[in-house]
Image (spheres, rainbow, N blue to C red):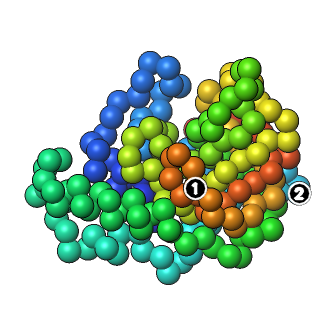
């Protein structure tokens, strides 16, 4: 799965970091399990892989680079990180997703608060995205505009976002973003029950 490659590359570049005391037990780079539950009738439940064009290879520019031989202070490692950020900021979106009514789970990266209210945020596929560099590729970030502002306590854990997806490139302090959603419904994500 390509999106798993994104998270693994992220962790390989930074090292796997433990969960913090404030999180609900997720580790940096960890993705949410995709429940088998039926989505609301008017939303199509999607995975993050649906947002990536089938022919896009996020690691194309790095095939010849042996990351295991690079140290953090190596100029080649710094150059590779810059190339990675540039490539991922320009990551192509999947045009077929434009206008789709979707339901997708993810983690919240607030883009500002106003008196304890979150008016917009980034939805990202794995825990810890945007806390460290590089952020996820543009096609793995969704700029979310909730119908009404959320309280900070509503975004402390992962969420489901339901709404109409648009392909719309934008730039935030955290990097390029390929999609946006005017969220009609946001609800807490619950881990699927294990058999």
Q: Is residue 176 left or right of residue 168?
A: left
Considering every residue shown, the one lying at the far right of the view is: 42
**Whether residue 110 can be seen here:** yes
Q: In this picture, is 59 found above or below 185? A: below
Q: Position of residue 20 (x, y in %)?
A: 42, 24
Q: Secondary structure at mark 2?
A: loop
Determine which residue is flagged by label 1: 171
Residue under the point 35% across and 30% down = 18
Image quadrant holding the C terminus, namely top right
The span from disc 2 to disc 1 (Cα, nearest Å) is 30 Å
Considering every residue shown, the one lying at the far bottom of the view is: 55
Count the marks.
2
Along the line of sight, the residue nearer the viewer: 16 or 180 = 180
Residue under the point 35% across and 69% down = 59
Q: Position of residue 75 (x, y in %)?
A: 15, 56
Determine which residue is flagged by label 2: 42
Residue under the point 85% across and 36% down = 148
Along the line of sight, the residue nearer the viewer: 35 or 114 = 114
Q: Earlier in the sequence, mark 2 or mark 1?
A: 2
Q: Position of residue 91 (x, y in %)?
A: 50, 68
Q: Is residue 189 left or right of residue 164?
A: left
Q: Is residue 183 left or right of residue 168?
A: right
In front: label 2 or label 1 = 1
Q: In this picture, is 174 found above or below 131? A: below
Q: Quadrant of residue 44?
A: bottom right
Q: Is residue 96 left or right of residue 183?
A: left
Along the line of sight, the residue nearer the viewer: 40 or 183 = 183
Q: Secondary structure at mark 1?
A: strand
**Whether residue 45 can be seen here:** no
Residue under the point 47% across and 43% down = 130
Q: Quadrant of residue 15?
A: top left
């Amino acid at each position: 799965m390509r999106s798993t490659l994104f998270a693994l590359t992220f962790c390989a570049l930074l090292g796997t970091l433990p969960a913090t005391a404030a999180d609900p037990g997720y580790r940096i780079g960890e993705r949410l399990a995709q429940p088998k539950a039926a989505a609301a009738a008017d939303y199509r439940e999607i995975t993050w892989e649906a947002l990536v064009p089938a022919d896009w290879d996020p690691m194309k520019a790095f095939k010849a680079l042996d990351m295991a031989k690079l140290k953090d202070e190596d100029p080649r490692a710094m150059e590779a990180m810059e190339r990675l950020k540039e490539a991922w900021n320009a990551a192509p979106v999947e045009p077929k997703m434009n206008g789709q009514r979707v339901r997708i789970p993810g983690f919240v990266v607030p883009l500002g608060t106003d008196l304890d209210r979150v008016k917009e945020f980034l939805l990202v596929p794995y825990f810890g995205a945007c806390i460290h560099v590089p952020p996820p590729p543009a096609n793995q970030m969704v700029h979310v505009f909730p119908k009404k502002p959320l309280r900070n306590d509503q975004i402390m854990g992962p969420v489901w976002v339901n709404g109409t997806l648009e392909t719309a490139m934008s730039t935030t302090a955290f990097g390029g973003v390929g999609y946006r959603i005017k969220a009609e419904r946001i609800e807490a994500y619950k881990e699927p029950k294990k058999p």
